[in-house]
Amino acid sequence: MKVVIGADHGGFELKEFLKNNFEYTDISWIDVGTYSAESCDYPLIADKVAETILNKQADIGVLICGSGIGISIAANRHKGIRAALLYSDEIARLSKEHNNANVAVFGARTQSRDDVVKYLT
């Protein structure tokens, strides 16, 4: 499975953690940035993730910013993208079952790494 992942500066460390520690052998990561903790514009990252999915270069996406809210709003501006901010087991399940979400969104400043990994599985 190809997963496109992107984060702004607030989510950079969590993005790197997921790429290097999410232990599923069938996942191939496509990293569209950001590539440092320097300030950047989150809508540009959301656009890159959305375009990668819409161009069928990835199956699903992961987006991360400080709260998860801004980057999910930016991603959902794209027709065909259903970005869901995952913050509980039930929301993670329902976002896939009822909304067919194709982008999982997380807040690096509001969620633990353990919870993010749990919601992705």
Image (cartoon, rainbow, N blue to C red):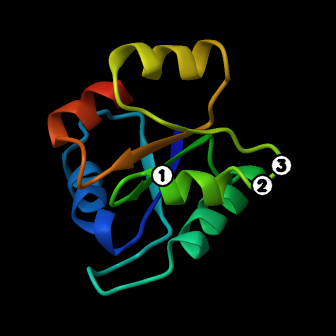
In the rendered view, does 88 fall on the left or right side of 33?
A: left
Marker disc for residue 51:
none
Q: Nearer the viewer, residue 84 or 54?
A: 84
Residue drawn at x 62%, y 67% is 48
Q: Nearer the viewer, mark 2 or mark 1?
A: 1
Residue 9 drawn above or below residue 38: above
Element assignment for label 3: loop
Point 78% across, 56% down: residue: 55
Q: Position of residue 43 (x, y in %)?
A: 59, 71
Q: Circle 2 is placed at which residue position?
A: 78
In terms of secondary structure, where does tag 1 sit? helix
> Seen in the image, is 75 located left or right of residue 30?
right
Vertical comparison of 4 with 48: above or below = above
Q: Which residue is mark 1?
A: 69
The residue that appears at 31% across and 63% down in the rendered structure is 11
Residue 98 picture location, percent across and down: 66, 14
Q: Tell me which residue sits at (56%, 22%) in the image.
A: 95
Q: Does residue 13 sit above or below 86 in this rendering?
A: below
Q: CA distance from mark 3 to mark 1?
A: 18 Å
Amino acid type at image mark 2:
His
Spot occupied by residue 117 in the image (x, y as percentages of width and height): 26, 34
Q: Are marks 3 and 2 in contact (CB under 8 Å)?
A: yes
Q: Earlier in the sequence, mark 2 or mark 1?
A: 1
Could you tell me how far apart the alpha carbons at marks 3 and 2 are, in whole angstroms?
Answer: 4 Å
Residue 34 appears at what percent x and percent y? 41, 76
Q: Are marks 2 and 1 in contact (CB under 8 Å)?
A: no
Write down the residue under mark 3: 79
Residue 17's quadrant in the figure? Answer: bottom left
Residue flagged by tag 3: what amino acid is it? Lys
